[in-house]
């Protein structure tokens, strides 16, 4: 399935399989603009800010995660809750005022379709979250803070993703 | 100012800042916040073999790899320049509960008694680091997203599947942390 860019574009336009899309989150919101690679540096800076916030808010801390799952502190609920409220207001404002990207493109949102994956996969991720004290973002941040053994956890998470890809057709959806 | 930054940030500062990442990524390039997809791109780049799930042009999603590279660098910057060296203030009940298993380290993001290279040779360490990591990777992709993609981006966009996924993340975490973790820590 090696597509030329032209074929990919046709496929994007004709892709109506939103179940696959919601699972995949790939190639459904493609910009038609083609930028040189260094345009991606802005995402590096966004990531740096995001990483600093994750560390300073202590949401990458194994102990904070245990506190959350023991209802022993409001901190994590406050962080996630206020992040959601801020995100919600932002998305509402973007939609209401039809705010464009800095390149003048329309900002697009795509619906997610319900499937059993959100339940089974969600529970499995929850188990992993409580064990490692990290979701995927914090894994990268923890390694950055000098906890180098977390590289093993990250590689294992890559392996888990790979095994999911391998078994995907056989799993309940 | 720098003294203020070096303290731990309260939830009402950090939460809205995390939330602002959503419009930031949308406005600078129509990207929806999500971290776990990066794990898929790594698979697609390194070992797609013949698995259809990994047959796509991962280079088109390279922004996501730059973003997680940034998270790593941000972690380094915060730990090197922006910490005050004080231990975390954790609920005393939780501290004493885990002290019973020999876990005391409140200085590191992951307690050093549990997360170190020697522990990888023990059943406990294998389950927590290798098993836990595997479940994070497998579960997030099966669910179609993680805390950032579902809980923050998805719920911000009022997606019911994301709310259901988030409830399941929490349910799984509660089960593991309260019921199973005590047995694993005794290993």
Image (tube, coloured by chain):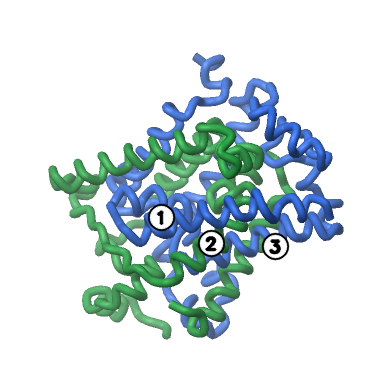
Under tag 1, what secondary structure? Answer: helix
Most foreground residue, B49 or B185? B185
Residue B154, image quadrant? bottom left
Q: Residue at x 45, y 31 (%)?
A: B14
Chain letter of mark 2 equals: A
Tell whether A132 sits left or right of B11.
Answer: right
**Residue B70, placed above or below residue A136:** above
Most foreground residue, A57 or B151? B151
Q: Return the residue at label 1.
A: B150
Q: Return the residue at label 2.
A: A123
Residue A34, image quadrant? bottom left
Mark 3 crowd level (few <14, some 14–19, many ≥20, 10 Å Cα):
many
Q: Quadrant of the C terminus of chain A?
A: bottom left
Chain letter of mark 3 equals: B
- Marks 2, 3: nearer the viewer: 2
Q: Residue at x 76, y 47 (%)?
A: B115
Under tag 2, what secondary structure? Answer: helix
In the image, the chain rendered in blue is B
Chain A's colour?
green
- Marks 2, 1: nearer the viewer: 2
Most foreground residue, B43 or B7? B7
Q: Residue at x 51, y 32 (%)?
A: A75
Residue B75 shows in this picture: no
Measure the alpha-carbon separation of dots 1 and 3: 22 Å
């Amino acid at each position: 399935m090696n597509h030329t860019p032209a074929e990919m574009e046709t496929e994007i336009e004709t892709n109506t399989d939103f179940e696959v899309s919601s699972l995949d989150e790939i190639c459904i919101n493609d910009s038609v603009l083609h930028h040189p690679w260094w345009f991606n540096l802005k995402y590096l800076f966004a990531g740096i800010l995001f990483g600093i916030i994750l560390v300073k808010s202590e949401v990458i801390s194994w102990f904070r995660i245990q506190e959350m799952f023991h209802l022993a502190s409001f901190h994590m609920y406050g962080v996630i809750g206020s992040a959601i409220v801020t995100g919600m207001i932002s998305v509402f404002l973007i939609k209401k005022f039809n705010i464009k990207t800095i390149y003048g493109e329309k900002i697009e949102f795509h619906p997610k379709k319900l499937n059993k994956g959100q339940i089974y996969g969600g529970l499995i991720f929850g188990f992993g979250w409580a064990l490692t004290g990290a979701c995927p973002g914090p894994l990268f941040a923890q390694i950055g803070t000098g906890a180098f053994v977390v590289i093993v956890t990250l590689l294992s998470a890559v392996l888990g993703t790979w095994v999911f890809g391998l078994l995907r057709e056989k799993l309940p959806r | 100012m720098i003294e203020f930054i070096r303290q731990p940030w309260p939830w009402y500062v950090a939460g809205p800042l995390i939330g602002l990442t959503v419009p930031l990524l949308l406005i600078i390039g129509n990207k929806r916040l999500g971290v776990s997809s990066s794990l898929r791109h790594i698979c697609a780049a390194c070992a797609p073999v013949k698995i259809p799930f990994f047959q796509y042009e991962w280079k088109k999603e390279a922004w996501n790899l730059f973003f997680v590279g940034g998270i790593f660098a941000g972690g380094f910057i915060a730990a090197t320049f922006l910490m005050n060296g004080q231990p975390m203030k954790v609920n005393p009940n939780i501290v004493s509960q885990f002290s019973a298993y020999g876990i005391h380290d409140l200085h590191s993001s992951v307690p050093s008694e549990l997360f170190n290279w020697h522990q990888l040779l023990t059943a406990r360490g294998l389950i927590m680091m290798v098993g836990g990591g595997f479940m994070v990777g497998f579960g997030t992709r099966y669910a179609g997203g993680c805390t950032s993609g579902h809980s923050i981006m998805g719920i911000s966009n009022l997606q019911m599947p994301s709310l259901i996924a988030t409830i399941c993340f929490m349910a799984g975490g509660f089960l593991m942390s309260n019921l199973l973790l005590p047995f694993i820590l005794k290993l």
